[in-house]
Each structure stands twice: as structure tokens, then as C-alpha cells.
Image: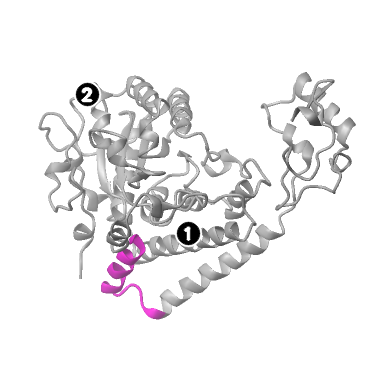
Amino acid sequence: MPSVTELMQLLTPTGHRITVPEEARSPGPDLPTGADPPVSKPRRADPPGGEPTAADIDLPAHVADLTADDLVGLYRDMTLVRRLDEEATSLQRQGELGLWASLRGQEAAQVGSGRALGPHDMAFPSYREHGVAWCRGVDPAAILAIFRGASLGGWAPAEHGFALYSIVVGSQTLHATGYAMGMARDGSDGAAIVYFGDGASSEGDVNEAFGWAGVFGAPLVFFCQNNQWAISEPTRRQSRTEIFHRASGFGFPSVRVDGNDVLACLAVTRWALARARSGRGPVLVEAVTYRMGAHTTADDPTRYRSAAELDAWRRRDPLDRMRAYLSADGLLDEDRERRIALEADTLAHDLRARCTTMPDPAPTSLFDHVQVADNELVSTQRAAFTAQFGADGEDGWRDGPPGPNRPNGPNGNGRKGGLVAGEARVSEEAW
């Protein structure tokens, strides 16, 4: 029967698993082991050179409080999240969603880190963090509404401690940095965490965020899910050095963790968040995992990666791994697993029903939440739009209002009139 210590191991820079993670140290001088400081009001980070390295983290100590129910709960989370992901993929293939970004293979990284978050923490996702959203209590139907075109974001970020999805690659790292700096100024007891991929690490926004967070000691965890592929480009084309090494150049520590190990991800994120909350500045976590599916449903991964590579990573499936651990420990029998699977199917069935009956948004909702409060320009544009198309927009459609399978754009079902900007109108020929 494997122990928690055996299950959780850091990775070397070459990706090999080791028991004593000496090779996983961030670049820098050899430093003594240091425990996490007590939580206190945020302050400026200490200068580089006095921070613990990856090998100094006592991973089992950060999950020592987990009960048997907690361990099974992590497996349940991953199972339900995968089932929701599968259902969303099917819905897209059947024309009910415009697009879907699958998280298959990354459940451990997302559930492990998501369950580490506290009530005062704030998470900033990209567009694939469905597992983190689940952990933060976001309704999965609200996520599907974005990909269906029925909403621009259907949850209150402050209520869930989970910001809206960010489609612009890497931009969320700057949002998170600014928010974390505000948390420090407000004396918050929480910290922020931001999710991005190995491809996003090449973006200028990410490197600017590293710089700002490091200089200002922002209470922020940068959580990079290195899933090996930035759409069709492998990680080796994103950086000449390992991603987790980059933090040292910006003056803060980093950790490389097995992203397919839910307990390791939970432990490392708890450590990183505690450090950030204490005012010791940012941390970079690189979770080494794999995107088992396509980048999105518009992608064909068979054109750029081999079946052998996929098969090798399939044998490291995070759900299979946790299932084997729980079964060996006598915590997961056939009956309990059957009940979890039934719960997952029930959840997916409910999600499908809610998705396919989701109403189309009112056309005038385009003007809602453009800014924090309405102003004269937005109000004038809304009034002009309503005057031409009607409050429900139906007067502006020759063949009726748009549905989930009816394009809303200029090449759709015969748009009459055009855009409205104040009193100016753009003719249909100008589309």
C-alpha cells in the first residue's frame, strides 16, 4: 500500500520522478530549510536569497489533516469534473456549443490547487479552468453559457472568489497581479492565484506580471499548467530553460510539481498560498501535466503529436492514479465508485438539459456591464439600438431572432440595418 509520501514527489527538470527532490531546487545558493511563517498582514517581499527552495517543502505536512472522506472527495471532484467535460465536448459536437476547451488530463492540477484555496482568496482563470471553477462553487451551466454565446460571464466573481474567464492569452496574469497588489494595500488576509499555460508563458503580459509581482511583493501564486502543448507547439519551443526556473530572474521562488498528482498539487498550492498570504511575495508553481484532448474542439491534435506520446501520458492518468491509491488503502470499493459514477452521470444529464433549454440573451444585453455604471454614451447607444431594432431585437431580423445554431453576424440570416453608434447607422452593404 503506497503512502502519501510515496504518492507525492516533485519532478526533476528532465521530468523524472524522484523521492528526494534535490534536483527540483530553483537556481540559487544552498539554503537551510525554513517553515512557512505565520499568516500576517501582507508586506513587501524579502530580497531574493533568503527564501526556501522547492526541496525545502515538507509536502506531507501540508496534507496531514486530510481525512479519508477528504481523500475520496478529491477523487469525486476529479470524476465529476471529467464527466462534465465529456458532456460539454459532446454538446459542442452536436451543435449546442460554439466551442469547448477540454481539461481532460489536467483534473489533478486543477482540483488539487482549487481545493487549496481559502474563502478570502481570489482565482484568475484562463478559459480551461473548469475544475477550479467547480471547486469555487461556480455553476457549470454558467460556463457552458459562455461557450454557447448566451452569456459573457454568468457568475459574480466576488461571490465565488473566481474571476471571469479570460480568452486573451496571458492577460489574466496582469489582472491577478493588480488585484493582489490591491489585496496587500487593503490588508486582506487572502492571496490571489492565477492560472496560465506553458504557451502563455511566452506572452509579454506574463513576463510583465512576473516583474510587477516580484518588485511589489504581491501576494500571488502563479500557477502554470504545463500541459506540453501550446496548441500545436511543444513546450521546448516556448523556452530554452524550464518554465519554473524563470521566477529566479524576477526575484521570487518557484516549485515544479507533478501535475497529475492531486495530493502533491494540493500540498504545494497550500504552501505557496500560505507564503503569499504571509506577505513574502509571489511564488511560481509549474504543474507538469498533459492535455489529453484537443486544444479546443476546433483543433486536430493528431496533426502535431504522436499516438505513442498520448499513450505514454494516458498511463499516467490522474484519475487512475488516485483510484489505485484509494483502492489500495481500502477507501474506495466498487459500491462507492459506482455511486460516484452515478452522481457524475446525473450531473451531466442535468447539465445537458439546462444547456439545450438555455434562452438566447436579449440583444440589448450587449450594452449591459460595458462599464461599472451606465454613462451618457452607453445609454445613447442602447436607446438608438432599441429605437431601430426594438427592445427584443426581433424587428431587426428578417427570419426571426437568432437561435443557438443561427449565426448572429453579417453573414447570418439576413441582418437588416446595421450597427448603431449614437445616431449614425451603418448600412448592410458596409458589413
Q: Amino acid at mark 1?
A: Val
Q: Secondary structure at mark 1?
A: helix
Between 361 and 77, the one nearer to me in the picture:
361
Q: Is residue 250 left or right of residue 181?
A: left
Tell me whether circle 2 and circle 1 mark residues in contact (CB < 8 Å): no
| Position of the C terminus by quadrant | top right
The percent coordinates of residue 28 (x first, y second) are 14, 29
| Residue 419, above or below 17 | above
**Which residue is denoted by mark 2 in the rendering?**
48
Between 358 and 278, the one nearer to me in the picture:
358
Please identify the residue farthest to the left as the structure is shown: 30
Between 266 and 91, the one nearer to me in the picture:
91
Hey, which quadrant is residue 220 in on the image? Answer: top left
Q: Read off the magenta span.
A: 317-334
The percent coordinates of residue 19 (x first, y second) are 14, 53
**Which residue is denoted by mark 1 in the rendering?**
81
Q: Is residue 328 magenta?
A: yes
Please identify the residue farthest to the bottom as the structure is shown: 335
Hey, which quadrant is residue 280 in on the image? Answer: top left
Q: Is residue 51 left or right of residue 181?
A: left
The percent coordinates of residue 147 (x first, y second) are 60, 48
**Front: mark 2 or 1:** 1
| Residue 255, above or below 279 | below
